[in-house]
Structure formats: structure tokens, C-alpha cells
Amino acid sequence: MNGQPLSPRRLWWLAVGFTIWCLALVILYALHAIGCAFGWPAGPLRVSLAIVLVLHLIAIGWLWRHRVAAGRDPGPERIGAFLHTVVIWTLIAALAATVITFGPALLLTTCI
């Protein structure tokens, strides 16, 4: 392998989108459990869950936009371009996974 190695710090971008997805999972389930345990009305509980979901979608969308606008990662030519493409698609996958995983849950009965 000729040329400069890619910095390991650049690899953290691969985990950012799904880290936010994990935070959304924890916060939404905790908020749901607390709301059900304390007997919150269904309307305000559903609205608070929707707000938390939208905030996480905005965070992933902002990162996606930021990474697209940033251009290719500095470093070795082929690896930097490949890593940039993979990070963009990982953020798109995290955004889609967040919508698919948590969106339909807002349509269900809040507490059983």
C-alpha cells in the first residue's frame, strides 16, 4: 500500500447515524414507559413521542446534509472518496431505519 494511511478518526463517521438511531430507541422507549407508568393521557404522550422522533430525524438529516456539503474526505484519493460515499449511504440508511422503525409505533395504542 503506497501513500498515506487514512486516519482512524474518519471511521467514527460510519457509526454516527446509527448512534443517533440508538439514542432515539432508548429515549422513545423510556419516555413511553414513563408516560404509561404515570398514566399520562394518550394525546400528550403521543405528541411528545412524535417530537422526540422528529428531533432525531432532524439530527440525522442535518448530519447527512453536512457530510454531503463537506465533500470528499481528505486523505488518500480512492479511500477518501469511498469512505465519503459509504458515510453518506450509512446516514441515509440510519434515516430510513429511524422512520421505518419508529414511525409506525406512533400509530399504535400508546398504553395497554
Image: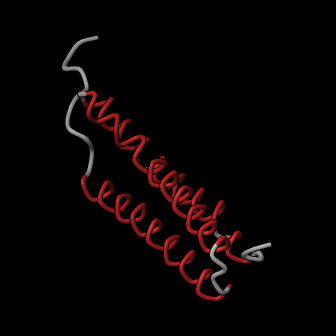
Frontmost residue, 8 versus 44:
44
Count of numbered badges drawn on the protein: 0
Question: Which residue is at a point 49% across and 72% down the rendered structure image?
Answer: 52
Q: Position of residue 37 (x, y in %)?
A: 66, 70
Frontmost residue, 52 versus 63:
52
State the image quarter where residue 28 is shown.
bottom right
State the image quarter where residue 42 is shown.
bottom right
Q: Position of residue 104 (x, y in %)?
A: 71, 70
- Determine whether, in the image, residue 47 is placed left or right of residue 67: right
In the rendered view, would you say 60 is above or below 71?
Answer: below
Q: Position of residue 89 (x, y in %)?
A: 48, 48
Task: Determine if residue 102 is in view.
Answer: yes
As drawn, which residue projects farthest toward the right?
A: 112
In the rendered view, would you say 42 is above or below 21?
Answer: below
Frontmost residue, 103 versus 24:
24
- Determine whether, in the image, residue 77 is placed left or right of residue 12: left
- Determine whether, in the image, residue 2 is placed left or right of residue 84: left
Instruction: Report the quarter where the N terminus lies.
Output: top left
In the rendered view, would you say 87 is above or below 41?
Answer: above
Question: Which residue is at a point 39% across and 64% down the rendered structure image?
Answer: 59
Question: Which residue is at a point 54% across and 56% down the rendered structure image?
Answer: 26
Frontmost residue, 16 versus 49:
49
In the rendered view, would you say 76 is above or below 29?
Answer: above
Question: Which residue is at a point 57% across and 60% down the rendered structure image?
Answer: 98
Task: Determine if residue 89 is in view.
Answer: no
As drawn, which residue projects farthest toward the front?
A: 38
